[in-house]
Image (spheres, rainbow, N blue to C red):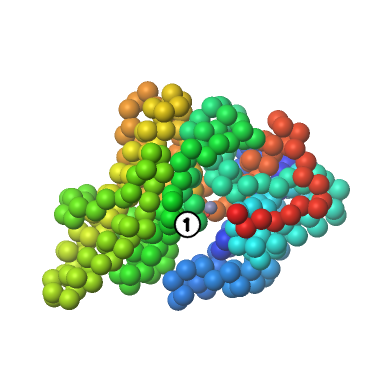
Amino acid sequence: MYTLGIESSCDETSCAVLSGYRVLSNATISSLSEHKKYGGVVPEIATRAHLKNINKVLEGALEEAGVALKNIGLVAVTNRPGLIGALVVGTSFAQAMSMALSRPLVGVNHLHAHLFAPFLNSRGPKFPFIGLVVSGGHTEIYRVDDFDRIKIIGRTRDDACGEVYDKVARAFGLGYPGGPILDRRFDPELKDVFKFKCGRMGMDLSFSGIKTAVIYKKMELEKSGSLCPAVVAGLLSSFQESVVTAIVAAVADAVVATGIKRVVCGGGVVANSYLRAKLAGLPSDIKMLLSERVYSTDNAAIVAGLGFYMYNKKGVKTGINLKVEAN
Ligand code: KG4
Ligand code: ZN
């Protein structure tokens, strides 16, 4: 069966075509460049960009997959969480497709879709697993017994991890989004120059303190005239060291607390090279499934994959009156 996936929760307009779990196409247009000068995603701009681009993205996805629209068997769409206006564009589009084609519609939770990334192009998911989602809007750890039995066992108590990457990069005037920029600038030799620490409360995390600490340290060094490029590199590398250390420690604790030795990681920050290396370096009896970089940031292939799983294995059909939810 061919599944059409649609994703529009933030600044990526994306459509994908899957055959079972096999990705035939995953077309995305990002409105990122339009947000850059504001240092973050502007919901109104993102919504208009989705409206402008969604037809083009659908055409691209169908063409690349070599599948005619009439042969689509299932429509899956992100209907939560995300920017409301942005979600409305994708969801209305999906509703229209489902009605026009007389095909079932499945609404998908975008965060859970991030956890489907490692199962794309595979025979499907295996349970139970510990799920880690680290993105621009969320940082959560789950116990996943199935995709309809997901329990949050840890989360950030304040800022999301990607959000903090973005804010620190902005404070250093490095551009947006900050994650990939700080990833490239990371120098392992400088990771211990400054001693920053993220908050840990059980399996919960806190990132807002470290964000403030790094920004204040920068201001202090600037005032004293000692903020040279080498010091900036030390600040940024030490920042990343403490963020990654905290996340990896929380995941290790989740494994110990639950006895579940399979870990699945997804979300934009999982594209980070140092985080990937550290997660992969956990004891070898932990089976670590990391989303491929191309499926880490927002895209419709993960939405189609999870939508197909829910329909095919769980009999989920959302119906045409699908609601959107910000949280
Ligand atoms: O999952 P995603 O594409 O969108 C949300 O659902 O939020 O995640 C976007 C976030 C941004 O904050 C971005 O800075 C971060 O993922 N990100 C990274 C990297 N690539 C993207 N953070 C750290 N290292 C990266 N390589
Ligand atoms: Zn996301």
All told, the count of numbered labels is 1
User: Depth check: 251 or 31 in front?
Assistant: 251
Quadrant where the N terminus is found in the figure: top right
In the image shown, does 217 or 123 lie closer to the viewer?
A: 217
Within-10-Å neighbours for mark 1: few <14, some 14–19, many 20+: many
Seen in the image, is 291 located left or right of residue 27?
left
Label 1 element class: loop
Q: Where is mark 1, residue-wise?
A: 136
For the point 45% across and 33% down, the residue is 263
Position of residue 43 in the picture relative to residue 135 (left or right):
right
Quadrant where the C terminus sits is bottom right
- Which residue is nearer to you in this view: 95 or 248? 248
Q: Residue at x 62, y 38 (%)?
A: 22
Q: Quadrant of residue 228?
A: bottom left
Question: Residue at position x 64%, y 68% from top?
Answer: 47
On the image, which quarter does residue 226 sit in?
bottom left
Against 6, residue 276 (above or below) is: above
**Amino acid marked by disc 1:** Gly
Query: Residue 293: horizontal and vertical position, in percent?
Result: 46, 47
Q: Quadrant of residue 3?
A: top right
Q: Is mark 1 within 8 Å of ligand 1?
A: yes
* Residue 268 visible (yes or no): no
Q: Say which residue appears at 49% left-offset and 52% top-offset.
A: 138
User: Can the viewer see residue 46?
Assistant: yes
Residue 15, image x, y percentages: 65, 54
Q: Is residue 248 above or below residue 83?
A: above
- Place of residue 8 in the rendered image (x, y in percent of width and height, measured from the top left): 63, 59
- Relative to residue 190, is residue 4 drawn left or right? right
